[in-house]
Image (spheres, helix red, strand yellow):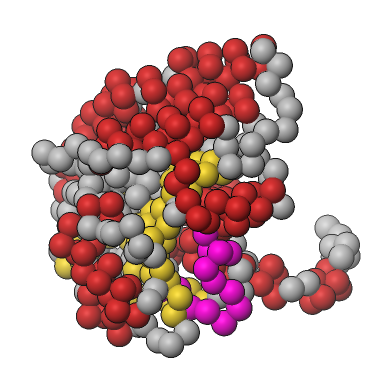
Amino acid sequence: MSTAPVAGTSLLSSLRPEARNAPESGIVEVVNHGRMKEGLIPLWVGEGDLPTPDFIVRAANASLAAGETFYTWQRGIPDLREALARYHTALYGRPFGMDSFFVTGSGMQAVQIVVRMITGPGDEVVIPTPAWPNVGAAIGVAGAIPVNVPMDYVQGRFSLDLGRLAAAITPKTRAIAINSPANPTGWTATKDELAAILALARQHGLWIIADEIYARFVYGDSARAASFHDVMEPEDRVLFVQTFSKNWAMTGWRVGWIEAPPAFGQVIENLIQYSTSGVPVFVQRAAIAALDEGEPFVAEQIARATEGRRIIAEGLKATNRVTLSPPDGALYQFFSVDGWQDSRALAIDLVDRANVGLAPGTAFGPGGETGLRLCFARKAPDLVETVVRLQRALAG
């Protein structure tokens, strides 16, 4: 085997440290370990097994057939922004205008743009953890510093210590990033908790980056999770990042949106222009169909997730080796296995011995080191088989 250095290795040190030090994904490491395994059940990433429904695909095809393949509105086509306003009006029970919505090339681009707007080198952003790692990475790439605040973990259930959150704020803090319902833990903030976080942000003049992507996936009597929309005033410093990926099975389409004060429009338009120059029109036509025609599909998704949550929680508890509590929201069961402290090693071991792909808690920051994340947005037979395989592996 050749031991010659990879071309360009000697030049790495000349790159900006923000780029050079961007962390590798601990999730992708496990995915790459098991990607080619025949018969593996992949529950390691945040997507279900349903393809995008036909009514959404047809809208994209019709747009392509009509020749909508040119440059377009940087903020998003008016039809989609109006559809977003209608969707929010129905979901939150009060009027929204299209001027608050800006279409992005994925939820991840929405995060990057928001981070770039409010942070820079030396700034700090407070993040309750375990947390989806991409937010902290986006903050670091922007030159800012993610400040992790581990959540409490008692008998498999996570809770946010508001005193600890407040103690993490310094003169350098610019924002608090809140994901509720949360990936990977399923923690779902109450209206009172959101009001307390907002009061803290007001007190210190901070922004809130609100990731409410899983708001529809809640388990109980509510149609949606509590939102900052329920407690905020028009002048509050809250920026929402969103995606079409989860509700409408559109992970591969790479389309999302930012909700922000209309006065921010030109700034956001400029940042979109200098990154992607806008989302393809045919993708936006598909997104309109998702919003306007997608409620039956969303209901199906929620029903499948509810059943998946039950199958996984009951099956894992039956091993008598697992600590967990069924999540209040989102698409994930986060759990720890007695006798295992290194979740990275455990995730790789379960790929090899159980042929099941899970995400290691080490990927999600402080507080998640001993846990595993399992995405239960999948058909019931696969989840039943997952339980059988994990029970067998954990009994060994």
Q: Is residue 65 left or right of residue 155?
A: right
Q: Residue at x 28, y 75 (%)?
A: 200
Report the residue that reaches farthest toward the front. Answer: 263
Quadrant placement of the N terminus: bottom right
Residue 153 in sight:
no
The picture places residue 244, in percent across and down from the top left corner, at 45, 36
Report the residue that reaches farthest toward the left. Answer: 221
Q: Residue at x 60, y 57 (%)?
A: 267
Relative depth, front residue between 106 and 153 = 106
Query: Splitting the image into 4 quarters, where does residue 193 fall?
Result: bottom left
Q: Is residue 348 above or below residue 57?
A: below
The picture places residue 183, in percent across and down from the top left corner, at 36, 53
Q: Is residue 287 above or below residue 29?
A: above
Relative depth, front residue between 289 and 231 = 231
Query: Splitting the image into 4 quarters, where does residue 144 fall?
Result: bottom right
Q: Is residue 104 above or below residue 2?
A: above
Q: Count of labels shown?
A: 0
Where are the magenta residues, as a range? 114-126
The picture places residue 207, in percent across and down from the top left corner, at 41, 68
Q: Is residue 108 left or right of residue 346?
A: right
The question of residue 226 being in magenta is answered with: no
Residue 313 in sight:
yes
Q: Is residue 18 left or right of residue 118?
A: right
The picture places residue 127, in percent across and down from the top left corner, at 39, 69
Relative depth, front residue between 108 and 293 = 293
Query: Splitting the image into 4 quarters, where does residue 21 fall?
Result: bottom right
Q: Residue at x 69, y 48 (%)?
A: 273
